[in-house]
Image (cartoon, helix red, strand yellow):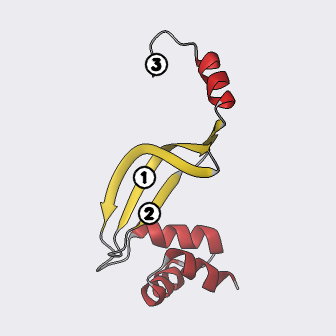
Amino acid sequence: MFGGIDPKQMQGMMKKMGISQEEVPAQKVTIEKSDGNLIIIENPSIMKIKMQGNTSFQISGDIKEVSREGEISKEDIETVMKKTGCSFKKAKETLEKTKDLAEAILKLST
């Protein structure tokens, strides 16, 4: 990042300025846009940065954008199946009704 500065020195300087950062382990990051479409970041590298009382995230990885209109993705169905232990058919039906991955998982988990 800054030529000639040792990473440990950089960490020390950042700490003195009240800046802390930590890596966040994750397999996938999903961002739901206001138009309902999704930005999916696979194999992400995520840094959580705290500075002056604010927290921000820096995310990089393999990015794809998915339209929420139309057919439900097989990945979403498999995720619901994995998290709830339900059948493919039940996961798909619930996703079609809720149109939301988290809501489908919650509905099938109760």
Distance (Cα) linking label 1 and label 2: 8 Å
Percent from the top left, x then y, of residue 32?
Answer: 42, 68
Q: Quadrant of the C terminus?
A: bottom right
Q: Amino acid at mark 2?
A: Ile
Would you identify the image quadrant in which residue 85 lies? bottom right
Task: Label 3: state its secondary structure.
Answer: loop
Which residue is located at x 46 percent, y 90 percent?
97
The residue nearer to you, when weighing 96 against 12, is 12
Percent from the top left, x then y, of residue 27?
Answer: 54, 50
Would you identify the image quadrant in which residue 18 lies? top right
Q: Amino acid at mark 3?
A: Phe
Which residue is located at x 50 percent, y 77 percent?
88
Residue picked out by circle 3: 2
Residue found at the far top of this picture: 4
Q: Earlier in the sequence, mark 2 or mark 3?
A: 3
- Which numbered dot is residue 41? 1
Residue picked out by circle 2: 31
Which residue is located at x 50 percent, y 54 percent?
28
